[in-house]
Amino acid sequence: MNAKREIADGIRSAMPVIFAAAPFGLLFGALAIDNGFSVFEAVLMSATVYAGASQMVGINLFGDHIAPWLIVLSIFAVNFRHVLYSAVVGRHVGHWSKLQRYFGFFFLIDPQFAEAEKRAEDGKTVTFLWYMSTATAIYASWILEGWLGAVFGKLVANPADYGVDFLLPVYFLGLVMGFRKRPSWLPVVAVSAVASIGAYVLVGSPWHVSLGALAGVLAAAAIGGEPAEAAE
């Protein structure tokens, strides 16, 4: 294994993610301050929770003075999809040690999952060095963006008025479209979308995120099909 090449490939994989997530990271920092967080608290949340959608849910609930246990439960509901990510990516990292998997899965956010899957589809090994090079670059930039938003967000009266928060669904749509060449992509996405919308209407946010993801998983399991590795 060429360590320098793995590191360079990892950082190169991270660059599009960093630029795409930058406005959202800045928005989080600004909205966190608007909801009564200190700069330190906003940065700490980015460093520990490290999940954009869940952080947005968290600061909104904190601002509404919701019971702490309900905040934790709501964040778990949004983040449940990461459990599904680990099950998928786990197929590609069997050569990692247990400690590496425990450590690496902390960084398994949406774009990290997408980049790992793309690398595996390209026939490349998802090495721990490549993975952590990508993850570290994204993680450091996310914390920096949250700090910048928290420090300078007060210069903007109401960040949400600029529609920057619309970048999140657009970004997620881009991730989903990246897998459009996979078999059964369309029916799985359709089932997930319908279930998510239905859950949003009947149950409410943030449960629609996890319920939509679970419906997509069940649809994929029902449709069946061999994994890409076995089909090659």
Image (cartoon, rainbow, N blue to C red):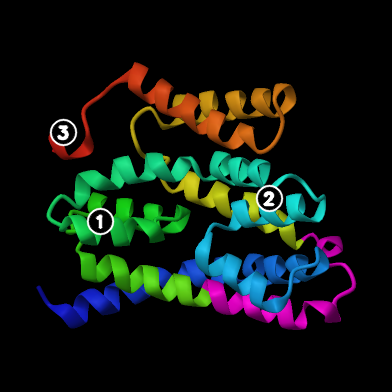
Q: Residues within 10 Å of mark 1 (few under 14, many from 20)?
A: some
Above or below, 214 against 40 in this view is: above
Residue 25's quadrant in the figure?
Answer: bottom right
The earlier-in-sequence mark between 1 and 3 is 1
Residue 128: percent from left, percent from top: 22, 65
Q: How crowded is mark 2: few (under 14 residues within 10 Å), some or many (20 or more)?
A: some
Residue at 22% across / 37% down in the picture?
228
Circle on res. 101: 1
Q: Say left or right for 137 vs 191.
A: left
Q: What residue type is labelled 3?
A: Ala
Secondary structure category for the residue under label 2: helix
Residue projecting furthest to the left: 1
Above or below, 128 against 148 in this view is: above
The residue pinned by badge 2 equals 57
Q: Say left or right for 53 vs 96.
A: right
Above or below, 157 against 81 in this view is: below
Tag 1–tag 3 contact (CB < 8 Å): no
Q: What stretch is highlighted in magenta?
A: 142-163
Residue mark closest to the camera, 3 vs 2: 2
Residue 109: percent from left, percent from top: 45, 55
Tag 3–tag 2 contact (CB < 8 Å): no
The residue pinned by badge 3 equals 231
Residue 36: percent from left, percent from top: 80, 67
Residue 225: percent from left, percent from top: 25, 24
Q: Which of 15 and 56 is in front in this view?
A: 56
Above or below, 192 against 49 in this view is: above
Residue 9's quadrant in the figure?
Answer: bottom left
Magenta residue check for 74: no
Circle on res. 140: none
Residue mark closest to the camera, 1 vs 3: 1
